[in-house]
Image (spheres, coloured by chain):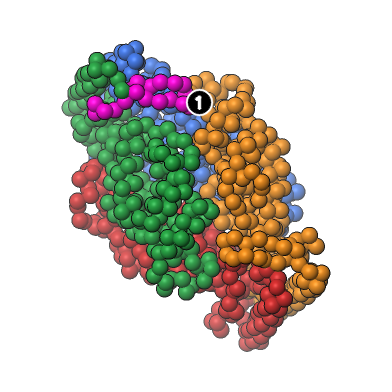
Chain colours: A green, B blue, C orange, D red
Amino acid sequence: MKASAMDYDVTMAARVSTIGSASAGREDTSPGLINFLMRDRHGSPFEHTSFTFLIEAPIFVAREHFRHRVGWSYNEESGRYTELKPVFYTPSPERNLVQVGKPGAYTFEPGTEYQQGLVNYVLTGAYRDAYADYESLLEKGVAKEVARMVLPVGIFTSYFATCNARSLMHFLSLRTISEGSTFPSFPQREIEMVAEQMEEIFASHMPITHAAFVRNGRVAP
Amino acid sequence: MKASAMDYDVTMAARVSTIGSASAGREDTSPGLINFLMRDRHGSPFEHTSFTFLIEAPIFVAREHFRHRVGWSYNEESGRYTELKPVFYTPSPERNLVQVGKPGAYTFEPGTEYQQGLVNYVLTGAYRDAYADYESLLEKGVAKEVARMVLPVGIFTSYFATCNARSLMHFLSLRTISEGSTFPSFPQREIEMVAEQMEEIFASHMPITHAAFVRNGRVAP
Amino acid sequence: MKASAMDYDVTMAARVSTIGSASAGREDTSPGLINFLMRDRHGSPFEHTSFTFLIEAPIFVAREHFRHRVGWSYNEESGRYTELKPVFYTPSPERNLVQVGKPGAYTFEPGTEYQQGLVNYVLTGAYRDAYADYESLLEKGVAKEVARMVLPVGIFTSYFATCNARSLMHFLSLRTISEGSTFPSFPQREIEMVAEQMEEIFASHMPITHAAFVRNGRVAP
Amino acid sequence: MKASAMDYDVTMAARVSTIGSASAGREDTSPGLINFLMRDRHGSPFEHTSFTFLIEAPIFVAREHFRHRVGWSYNEESGRYTELKPVFYTPSPERNLVQVGKPGAYTFEPGTEYQQGLVNYVLTGAYRDAYADYESLLEKGVAKEVARMVLPVGIFTSYFATCNARSLMHFLSLRTISEGSTFPSFPQREIEMVAEQMEEIFASHMPITHAAFVRNGRVAP
């Protein structure tokens, strides 16, 4: 994890609008100014910042993450050039397993003990079998990019993701569920878990910006 | 498939640079001008065009496609909201299966008859078993977004992809292999197959632009 | 002006999420679905559309317009390659001339008759003198790209701007003032005049999408 | 000026492709790997870097700069919210003033002593008069955003520009002229002067990447 992101970067960039190049020398991080920018959707001052995350997540999460295009850069482990490792995702017991309602308005409820056991049993077996097939194909000389076709989307991948504070807030507004949000959001729990960790890092580097984000209904400026 | 893309769009946009708004009335599609723009990397005139493709491809291809961020828009079938259909990818006999060389300089060679048979046999079995697991989980009331974790990246997905001629040429330059290219490219064969179909459509709508692209070493302007 | 943009493009793209590739055949334009997408910020289905505008506006307006980067393409008349024509912007009598309040919360009020006359008189004279200087320098063989340095930002330029419905709505939400908007906006009147014309074209091509945009507080999805 | 950009960022991101998350611990900056990435157009590893420049330049330069959309963020001094200062651009005696050839293939030659004197004389007078008009309008209570219409594009503005190494290289390839470039470029001298200073900063922070850029014909990967 690498970050070049401080609340000061935001005020510095914003002040160039009103006081020109002299703004570069002012060492202020006015919470009032940051809150004003957030509230009135002056988004560009938040872009002069950079966060680089190293993320390990299942492919189905990476697929959702990579849909974020604007202000995001990615590099991911390649199933063409490397042999993927047998690390797979299985939901923890707290993960809600049952979907209720209709498309666009799903909610999730805990599964029964039987459903929890079944998910665990079926995933474990399916992952083991798929990886055995993968290894068999590799052993017989089949190219990695072909052999990997059998691997399930529950396998872990790793990737670097770089973004700025504005694109990060946009991501957080869509990929977390939080009381007090102006807009609803419907993330799959697994990407929300990634987003929560990213939000902690964001809050620790840019506490005033993060507070303004929360205070203004988690709407990215 | 939908396109709003003609060679005329390019010359019209380019001529605004030199003759101002009057350019909008000129109905020319000068091959010389288009070739000049391509050669000297004046890329923006190629952006006032739009292609929308409906693509059906395995997830591992979609994953590569979605890495193209600039000038691309996507909507994809959702494994959270729909039950995915049992359609899977198996390489045809012509597909080279053996990887030779080292990272960054791979080439591919045909597999033996045994390898071809094995790939077919293993993939078919793995796909069948994974889909049976998927159906079992769904039957027992497990949410689609959880059950799909067992599904392999060889399963088909469908998506709309919209781009302009400039972003399309950039895609083609990286995702096809062609003699006469200025730069090398290393696409996986399966995304190249998608790219080849897209290139045909491109060439039919914008023949002069496509010819200039080929003539200038398949470098996107 | 060229557009490849219909309400149907939106529903077609949205339905691929839930019914896969079969969506391509359905000829519906459900206002309910479009309103749902707008309300819950499912923005990507609005991107499979394309509008190309030919705009004639003063440089100070073009400068604001070109700040919109995402989903926008531009080609503009060049002051390096063409001799700019003596067409300049002067505010009409209805244009408010006096700024009241403080940065971030300005409002504008009509000028006095004297102020109106003065603005007209000073601008006209300044434009005439600057253009005479420009012509003198050109006559003496000075390069266009040097001679244009004297030209004021009130001179007209022309440019093509291409965007999709999502990026257009983002532009409209920031560059128009409208009752019923969820968020405040502070456009300069001159770019708002451009935006108003673009909004008319948008509404005529995508009436259901435009209605949903207005109904949902003019927040771009 | 602020930078979070090292050659190590590039190799770290590139190695995640081949060795997964373990790459984050390797402290290497292999020139061979960086050169390979540059040569074969693997551009994404160069994006996990960030440069923030504070630039003071005439408006006609800022206009060209802001055409760079992808991977660039800007905040600029506002002529709506601040009174612009009377700082204007006049070419130095070394600046070539005469344009020879035709559009697309211009070259520039020094002006005569008379032309040099004339440019200096006319610009100085035009700038002084325009600024006097600007001040008159402000004095009489006319809004800044209206008064500024008289100001010439030769007036200085200041802005923050943030980019990553990949978008910076793309900028440099178009906005500098250099022997050994694979592609021709035609920047106006004034933006090239800005680009040259940016290139020095780039080279000092990422010497291996910069060397690979030069060695590979100044083509952005």
Q: Amino acid at mark 1?
A: Val
Chain letter of mark 1 equals C
Determine whether the residue tagged by mark 1 lies in a helix, strand or loop.
helix
Q: Circle 1 is placed at which residue position?
A: C16
In this view, D117 is above or below D102: below
Q: Quadrant of the N terminus of chain D?
A: bottom left
Seen at 68% across and 53% down, the residue is C192
Magenta-colored span? A92-109
Crowd band around label 1 with a 10 angstrom C-alpha radius: few (<14), some (14–19), many (20+) = many
Q: Nearer the viewer, residue A105 or D8?
A: A105
Give the x, y percent position of residue A208: 38, 57
Q: Quadrant of residue B16?
A: bottom right
Q: Nearer the viewer, residue A215 or A184?
A: A215
Secondary structure, magenta segment, majority class: loop
Seen at 72% across and 48% down, the residue is C197
In this view, D18 is above or below A39: above
Q: Residue furthest left?
A: A139
Give the x, y percent position of residue C153: 67, 67
